[in-house]
Image (spheres, grey):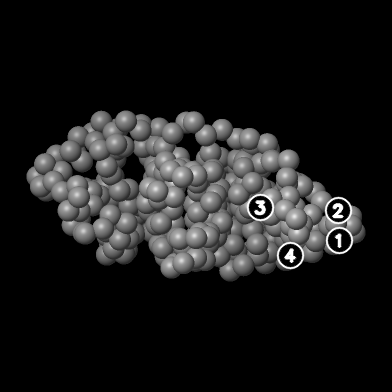
Amino acid sequence: MKSILVPCDFSKPAVSAFRLALDIATRSNGDIHLLHAIQLPVTNDSTLIPVLNLEADALKDLRLKAEKSFKILIDDYAEGKANISTEVYFGSVAKAVDYYTGEKQADLVIMGSHGATGARDFFIGTNAEKVVRIASIPVIVVKQYAQGPVKSIVFPTTPELESHGQLVNQVKALQQHFDAHLHLVWINTPQNFTNDTQTLKRLQSFAHKHGLKEYSLHVFNHNDEEYGILEFANIIQADMIALGTHARKGLNHLLNGSLTEDIVNHSKGLVWTCVLTNEHKNEPAAPSEIGPF
């Protein structure tokens, strides 16, 4: 966690994300890259192409306003705690994160989120949800800053994770950074029900195979996997939930959804996510974006 990218719209959740980034950067002697993305309006005859002919003075004014807000934020919370850089990007938050992940060689994104429910959740989602879907590096989503260290991490475990050693290694590194206790939990639902004895043996084998330390094993019964994870984390008062995501896109995402993105939207606590596959690679900003300015 040496290079942390923090998308920032200066809202309360974004400030919470920055404060968490400060805590982590101070602990790891890392750098923080604050990033403000400004979504431009679109032309009347196209919903895809941003207005590129805005006067240069208008763009400069937007940039200066963001830089003033950056200064206030840093003066209020940083106090020389970390090496901090600031960037302004004209375009979507997701594309800004995709661009600067490579530009800054970031190894972690921390971003705030208000969450989403109901129709907004289904049709629009959140910027955090979109970043989780496209990010090639781990993402921590923050709703509210909590004073104090992360001491307990819930790691929901499924049979498919047995073949994702890279994800488990990332979770181990996360646990080691915070010196936290890891709670491996199997959510027993009617759709994937197994008896407790069999499940605990499988969890123990999983933990032994990956050399886990400072952990406990749990089987939690619930009729829904997402709300089972959230309820279990709430019962044990966990500080963080760690999840892998398939980063589904397009029709696949619409039809199958994403458990991880749902938890990102609905959890009140910290959620750490990492893409399960190695197929996603950084790409330059799309031609329809103005990009950094």
Q: Residues within 10 Å of mark 4 (few under 14, many from 20)?
A: some
Name the kind of residue labelled 4 in the image. Ser
Q: Amino acid at mark 1?
A: Ala
Above or below 46: residue 286: above
Residue 89 location (% of width, % of height): 73, 51
**Residues at marks 1 and 3 touching, judged by CB atoms closer than 8 Å:** no
- Residue 243 % position (x, y): 38, 47
**Mark 1 or mark 3: whose residue is earlier in sequence:** 1
Identified at 89% across, 55% down, the residue is: 56
Element carrying mark 3: loop
Dot 4 corresponds to which residue? 69
Q: Quadrant of residue 201?
A: top left
Can residue 20 be seen here? no
Looking at the image, tell me whether mark 1 or mark 4 is earlier in sequence order. 1
Give the mark nearest the N terminus, 2 or 4. Answer: 2
Q: How many angstroms separate mark 2 from mark 4 (CA)? A: 25 Å
Q: Nearer the viewer, residue 257 or 269?
A: 257
User: Which label sits on residue 92?
Assistant: 3
Q: Residue at x 59, y 62 (%)?
A: 14
The residue at 50%/54% (across/down) is: 129
Q: Which residue is mark 1?
A: 58
Please identify, in this view, whether the residue under mark 2 or under mark 1 is nearer the observer. Answer: 2
- Label 1 residue SS: helix
Q: CA distance from mark 1 to mark 4?
A: 17 Å
